[in-house]
Amino acid sequence: MAFEGIEGQAQAAHQLGALLRSGRLPHALLFLGSAGTGRLATARELAGVLLCSEAAEPDESCGRCTDCRMLAADTHPDYAEVGLPEGRQALPLQAVRDVQHSAGLKPVRAARRVFVVRDAERVTEEAANAFLKTLEEPPGGCVFVLIASSLRRIPETIVSRCRPVRFTNIAPDVLGRHLEAQGYGPDDAHWLAGRCWGAPGLAERLGRAGLHELNRELIARLQSASPDDNLSLSDWLAGQARGAGGASAREALQDMLECLAVYCRDLALLAAAPQGPHPLVNRGSEPELRERSAGGSAEQFLDHADTVMETIEMVGANAQMRLALDRMFTLLCGAATRPT
Ligand SMILES: [Zn+2]
């Protein structure tokens, strides 16, 4: 059966397998769950099952036929994926128009076409309205998989036309053991699992990017920071983001800022109850965090975490990145007057 390799998502795998075997797969599915829980990998596996020309069972793909190989090479003419264009915050109307245009054509090789819409919660209102027409009168033989992390921003009219499939985060201690088995040290595995809220794909991505090491350096720099260090910390963080390979600088910066928010929450936990026990994500840096937390209150550190989250949003909204970072570090480094 397909989907067995998608870690921790037995429920979603079971649901999709049953739909495929029953021959009643809906024309639109909505994969809901946080980033890194395997939504896209599952959508691609589903496409493999739907496009494979030599599968023995309705819920399998052979992995060897021309269709399977074309899909793996990202060249299958009956498969298309759309998502946020680089540097954009909303899924534009044109992306939906492209899908609609292709959906109106006959499949080239397979019996159907499969369309995957990533970041479906970022769809603009006009794009959502356009897409709704396609979902209301779906062209024959098309399967649409929408991927989203939350229902909040998707119009109800679209949600109501899709079959939801939920992807859950797995328990961080389970993910931590899995990461240890992959060769991470216990503290790094614990940190990655906690930092990623049990999302295996995210933990793998951040682990590959070396974020656990960067996080240690960030903590060391904050440990010795004085109020005058806000600009040099901004410089350092922005420089690290620019130098990040693969992901865009903006995404890399947001990843690092989320580490900072987790650090602030750990400080708040320690400040609230110094005797513990504490479910610290930064367990490996507990002595440093203890020292740092002694200088403030839980309320103050939660306030810092909020500021970091605001900064993440500002960075995402294309705000002045440097200005946002300077403002945040001024607060975190404990300047006497809080900037406004
Ligand atoms: Zn095949």
Image (tube, rainbow, N blue to C red):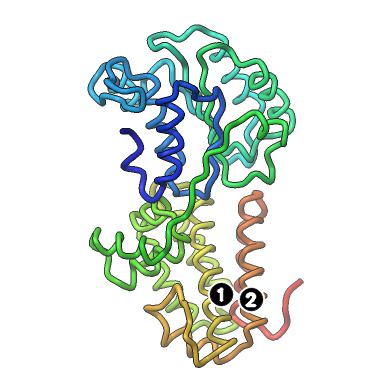
- The label number, if any, that marks residue 333 in the structure image: none
Of 56 and 201, the residue lying toward us: 56
Mark 2 surroundings: few (<14), some (14-19) or many (≥20) residues within 10 A: some
Of 242 and 293, the residue lying toward us: 293
Percent of width and height locating residue 64: 23, 22
Q: In this view, does 282 lie above or below 166?
A: below
Quarter of the image containing the N terminus? top left
- Identity of the amino acid at label 2? Leu
Residue at (46, 37) in percent of width and height: 15
Percent of width and height locating residue 179: 30, 61
Q: Tally the marks.
A: 2
Toward the right, the furthest residue is: 340
Q: Quadrant of ligand 1?
A: top left
- The label number, if any, that marks residue 265 in the structure image: 1
Whichever of callouts 2 and 1 sits on the residue coming sooner in the sequence is 1
Q: Is residue 236 above or below residue 65?
A: below
Percent of width and height locating residue 29: 54, 31
Residue at (49, 28) in percent of width and height: 81
- For label 1, the SS is helix
Residue at (49, 64) in percent of width and height: 237
Q: Judge from the rendering whether residue 18 lies leftward or rightward of residue 123; answer left or right.
A: left
Residue 175 visible in this rendered orientation of the protein: yes
Q: In which quarter of the image is residue 212?
A: bottom left
Provide the residue designation for mark 2: 302
Toward the front, the furthest residue is: 22
- Identity of the amino acid at label 1? Arg
Of 102 and 208, the residue lying toward us: 102
Residue at (76, 71) in percent of width and height: 340
Mark 2 → mark 1, Cα distance in angstroms: 6 Å
